[in-house]
Image: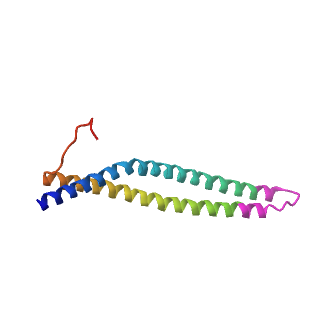
């Protein structure tokens, strides 16, 4: 009797865990897509900053009147450095999300296999919670 109650308790916990995993998986995938989009934007911004810095350098070389554009070029390069830093942070976050998503899928498959193997896998009718 105690073993039956223990099996039911374990299967309830597995069902709750699987429900939580199913609930979180779309959010993790959506967040991963947003991070990927943000990384692409960061790369594009970095390229624009590089182009602008080189263009300012060329303008400075061709000017007959000496304009001191060096502070602006330095500001652009500092902004570029920050963009690269944010891009690295986003890349690390995306890699963690990818690993989390992989682990969620692996754990879900493992639990399903365990439940099916133990014969405790009960399917509910779709109309009832």
Residue in view at x 47 percent, y 60 percent:
93
Percent of width and height locating residue 53:
71, 57
52 or 128: nearer the eye? Answer: 128
The C terminus sits in image quarter: top left
Q: Main secondary structure of the magenta part?
A: helix
Percent of width and height locating residue 58:
75, 56
From this view, report whether residue 126 is shown above or below residue 91: above
24 or 1: nearer the eye? Answer: 1
96 horizontally vs 65: left or right = left
84 horizontally vs 58: left or right = left
Residue in view at x 42 percent, y 61 percent:
96
Q: How are the residues colored?
A: rainbow
Residue in view at x 43 percent, y 59 percent:
95
Q: Which quadrant would residue 124 be assigned to in this image?
A: top left
Percent of width and height locating residue 80:
64, 60
Q: Is residue 64 magenta?
A: yes
- Bounds of the magenta span? 58-75
29 horizontally vs 4: left or right = right
* Residue at the far left in the pictured view: 1
4 horizontally vs 78: left or right = left
The N terminus sits in image quarter: bottom left
83 or 30: nearer the eye? Answer: 30
Residue in view at x 21 percent, y 57 percent:
9
């Amino acid at each position: 009797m105690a073993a039956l109650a223990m099996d039911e308790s374990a299967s309830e916990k597995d069902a709750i865990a699987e429900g939580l995993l199913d609930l979180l998986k779309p959010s993790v995938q959506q967040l991963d897509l947003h991070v990927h989009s943000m990384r692409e934007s960061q790369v594009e911004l970095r390229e624009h900053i590089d182009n602008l810095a080189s263009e300012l350098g060329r303008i400075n070389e061709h000017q007959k009147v000496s304009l001191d554009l060096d502070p602006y070029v330095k500001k652009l390069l500092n902004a570029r450095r920050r963009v690269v830093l944010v891009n690295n942070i986003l890349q690390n976050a995306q890699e963690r999300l990818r690993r989390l998503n992989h682990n969620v899928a692996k754990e879900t498959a493992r639990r399903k296999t365990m439940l099916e193997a133990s014969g405790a896998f009960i399917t509910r009718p779709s109309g009832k919670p």
